[in-house]
Image (cartoon, coloured by chain):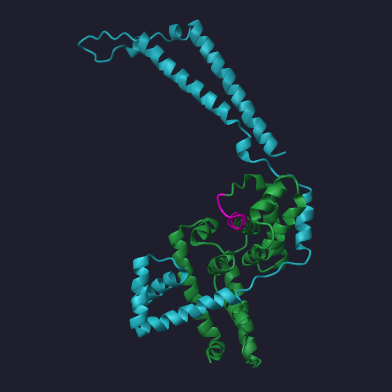
C-alpha cells in the first residue's frame, strides 16, 4: 500500500467514523496543517456525499408485492427448528448415555484382575479374555437391549422431525 | 425506510397469524432486494423472480429469525444466497456477464457523446451510471453501505467475508467509483464543481 492509498484509507475511516479517538485527533491535526490532506479529504467527502444523496435503487414491477403475497398465501411458516426437539429429552438421553458409559467402565475395571506378574505390566491378558462370558450376563443383555430400544426411539424422533419439516 | 411499524413488530404480527402485514416488509425492502438481484442477472424478469423467491423464503423461515441481526441483514443474506443459487441453476458465466454489462454501459455512454448529447448530467444519473461500470461485488458493497444502512459487520454477514475485508473492499470500491467518474464523467464533474 503506497502513501496515497494509506492516506485515503485513513481518511475514509475518518469519514465513516471507524476510527479510534487518538487516531481521529491525529487526522484532525493533519487536516488543519497539511494542504495535501485537506484536498484529498474534500475530494473523498464529495464522493461520500454523492453516494449518500444520489445512489438510486431499481424498482420492480407494480405487481411485485401482489405476486409475493399471492405466493405466500399458499404457504405456511415453517416452525423454528429449535422447537422440533424438546431440550429436556436431549439432556435426559445424553445423561443416560453418559451414566451408561461410566457404569460400563467401572464394571470393566471391577472385572479386571489387578494382580500382576513381573513379565507383564498389563493387569490382565487380552488373549485370555473370555468375551462370551462377559456378554452372557443377564445385566449386560438388559443394558444392551435398553440401549437398542432408546436408539430406535431416537431414530424415530429424528425421522419424524424431518417428515414434519418437509410437509 | 422505517416509518410505520418496525420490522420486529411486523414480524411478530405475521407470526401471530396476520399474514397480510408481511406486505409492509415487502414494500419496504423490495427496491433494495430487486437492486441486488438485478446485479446478478441483466434480465429484469429473472431478477424479479429471484427477488420474489427471496421474500418467499424469508416468509417461510420467519419463525427461525431470532432477531440477533437486523431483519434487513437477514433478508439481504437470503437474497444473496438466492442469487447465487439462481446463477448455479442457470450456469451463467458470472465474469463474462459482468464484462458484458460493463461493455454495454460503456457503449451507451460513448454513443451519448457521439450524439453530442453533452448537456450536464444530473448527479443522480452520473453516480448510477458510474456504479454500473463497477464489478457486481463493488456495486453491492456500496449499495449495502449507503442505501441498505448496513454496518461493516452486517455486510460481512451478508457477503460471507470478514469485516476487515469488507472495510478494504469498501475503500477500493469507492476509489474505483471515483476513478470511473473521473474517467467517464470528467465534464460533468467539472460542471458540478463550478
Chain A shade in the render: cyan
Quick check: A110 left or right of A42? left
Of B41 and A53, the residue lying toward us: A53
Q: Residue furthest left?
A: A118
Chain B shade in the render: green
In magenta segment, residue B149: no
Which SS type dominates the magenta stretch? helix
Question: Is residue A26 visible from the viewing direction of this image?
Answer: yes
In the rendered view, tell whether residue B167 sits above or below residue A6: above
User: Which residue is depicted at the point 57% across and 31% down?
Assistant: A87
Quadrant of the drawing holding the N terminus of chain B: bottom right
In magenta segment, residue B76: yes
User: Which residue is depicted at the point 45% across and 8% down?
Assistant: A132
Q: Position of residue A117 (x, y in %)?
A: 22, 9
For the record, the magenta segment spans B68-78
In the rendered view, tell whether residue B178 sits above or below residue B88: below
Q: Position of residue A49 (x, y in %)?
A: 53, 77
Q: Position of residue A40 (x, y in %)?
A: 42, 81
Q: Quadrant of residue A101?
A: top left
Q: Position of residue B142 (x, y in %)?
A: 54, 69
User: Which residue is depicted at the point 72% across and 67% down?
Assistant: A60
Quick check: A67 left or right of B41? right
Question: Is residue A1 visible from the viewing direction of this image?
Answer: no
Of B166 and B67, the residue lying toward us: B67
In the rendered view, tell whether residue A69 sits above or below residue A1: above
Q: Quadrant of residue B29?
A: bottom right
Amino acid at each position: 500500500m503506497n502513501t496515497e492509498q494509506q492516506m485515503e484509507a485513513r481518511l475514509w475511516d475518518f469519514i465513516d467514523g471507524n476510527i479510534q479517538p487518538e487516531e481521529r485527533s491525529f487526522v484532525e491535526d493533519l487536516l488543519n496543517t497539511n494542504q495535501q490532506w485537506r484536498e484529498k479529504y474534500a475530494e473523498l467527502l464529495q464522493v461520500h456525499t454523492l453516494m449518500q444523496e444520489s445512489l438510486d435503487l431499481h424498482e420492480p414491477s407494480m405487481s411485485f408485492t401482489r405476486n409475493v403475497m399471492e405466493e405466500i398465501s399458499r404457504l405456511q411458516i415453517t416452525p423454528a427448528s429449535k422447537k422440533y426437539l424438546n431440550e429436556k429429552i436431549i439432556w435426559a438421553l445424553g445423561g443416560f448415555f453418559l451414566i451408561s458409559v461410566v457404569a460400563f467402565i467401572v464394571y470393566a475395571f471391577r472385572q479386571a484382575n489387578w494382580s500382576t506378574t513381573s513379565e507383564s505390566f498389563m493387569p490382565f491378558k487380552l488373549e485370555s479374555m473370555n468375551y462370551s462370558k462377559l456378554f452372557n450376563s443377564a445385566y449386560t443383555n438388559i443394558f444392551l437391549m435398553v440401549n437398542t430400544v432408546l436408539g430406535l426411539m431416537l431414530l424415530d424422533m429424528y425421522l419424524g422431525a424431518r417428515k414434519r419439516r418437509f410437509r | 425506510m422505517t416509518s410505520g411499524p418496525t420490522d420486529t413488530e411486523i414480524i411478530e404480527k405475521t407470526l401471530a397469524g396476520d399474514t397480510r402485514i408481511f406486505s409492509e416488509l415487502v414494500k419496504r425492502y423490495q427496491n433494495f432486494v430487486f437492486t441486488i438481484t438485478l446485479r446478478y442477472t441483466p434480465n429484469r424478469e429473472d431478477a424479479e423472480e429471484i427477488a420474489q423467491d427471496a421474500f418467499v423464503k424469508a416468509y417461510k423461515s420467519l419463525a427461525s429469525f431470532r432477531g440477533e441481526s437486523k431483519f434487513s441483514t437477514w433478508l439481504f443474506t437470503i437474497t444473496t444466497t438466492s442469487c447465487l443459487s439462481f446463477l448455479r441453476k442457470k450456469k451463467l458465466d458470472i465474469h463474462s456477464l459482468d464484462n458484458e454489462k460493463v461493455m454495454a454501459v460503456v457503449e451507451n455512454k460513448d454513443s451519448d457523446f457521439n450524439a453530442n448529447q453533452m448537456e450536464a448530467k444530473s448527479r443522480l444519473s452520473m453516480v448510477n451510471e458510474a456504479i454500473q461500470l463497477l464489478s457486481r461485488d463493488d456495486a453491492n458493497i456500496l449499495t449495502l453501505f449507503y442505501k441498505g444502512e448496513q454496518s461493516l459487520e452486517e455486510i460481512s454477514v451478508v457477503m460471507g467475508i470478514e469485516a476487515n475485508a469488507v472495510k478494504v473492499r469498501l475503500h477500493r470500491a469507492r476509489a474505483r467509483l471515483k476513478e470511473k467518474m473521473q474517467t467517464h464523467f470528467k465534464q460533468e464533474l467539472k460542471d458540478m464543481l463550478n
